Image (cartoon, grey):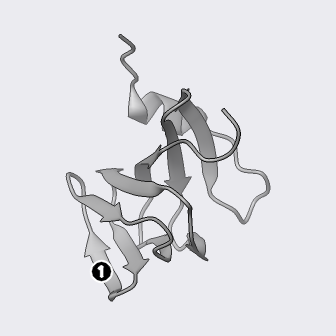
Amino acid sequence: MNIYDALTLAAAAIAPNGGRPATTLVHDSSDARVVLFRLEAGQAVPVHTSSSTVLLMIVSGTGTVTGEDGEHAVKPGDIVAYAEQEPHGMQAAGEQLIIAAVIAPRPGPG
């Protein structure tokens, strides 16, 4: 069993450049991947698709998520489920937004 502290891991996440959200790979196994996103106020992950099911769990902050049926506000405790190939994206509102994403099955080669 592994227990992860999402807030501590998100605080240490690294952004590839100043304008993009910080991410960290929390867990990676042959059947699932967990990634933490730390989006500062106004930052976004553009709408994209995945060959896997994607589950987003809002850890802290507020923002919006986008899917096939439009844009929806999210808050801590919300869980958003996207089907395979469903377009999805996320954006922080006026505060930092931390999201844990579970991607299953794990994309790419095992």
Mark count: 1
Between 74 and 54, the one lying in front of the other is 54
Residue at the extreme bottom of the image, as rendered:
70
Which of the image's four quarters has the C terminus?
A: top right
The residue at 69%/62% (across/down) is 20
The residue at 38%/66% (across/down) is 83
Q: Is residue 72 above or below residue 49?
A: below
Residue 97 seen from this side: no
Residue 22 appears left or right of 2: right
Residue 1 appears left or right of 21: left
Image quadrant where residue 14 sits: top right
Which of the image's four quarters has the N terminus?
A: top left
The image position of residue 38, as x and y in percent, is 52, 51
The image position of residue 101, as x and y in percent, is 44, 49
Between 73 and 101, the one lying in front of the other is 101
Image quadrant where residue 92 sits: bottom left
Q: Residues within 10 Å of mark 1 (few under 14, many from 20)?
A: few
Residue 71 appears left or right of 41: left
Residue at the extreme right of the image, as rendered:
17
Residue at the extreme left of the image, as rendered:
77
Q: Is residue 58 above or below residue 74?
A: above
The residue at 22%/58% (across/down) is 78
The image position of residue 80, as x and y in percent, is 29, 62
Between 72 and 62, the one lying in front of the other is 72
Residue flagged by tag 1: what amino acid is it? His
The image position of residue 47, as x and y in percent, is 56, 77
Between 23 and 47, the one lying in front of the other is 47
The residue at 68%/45% (across/down) is 108
Q: Which residue is mark 1?
A: 72
- SS class, disc 1: strand
Residue at the extreme top of the image, as rendered:
1
Q: Is residue 79 above or below residue 74?
A: above
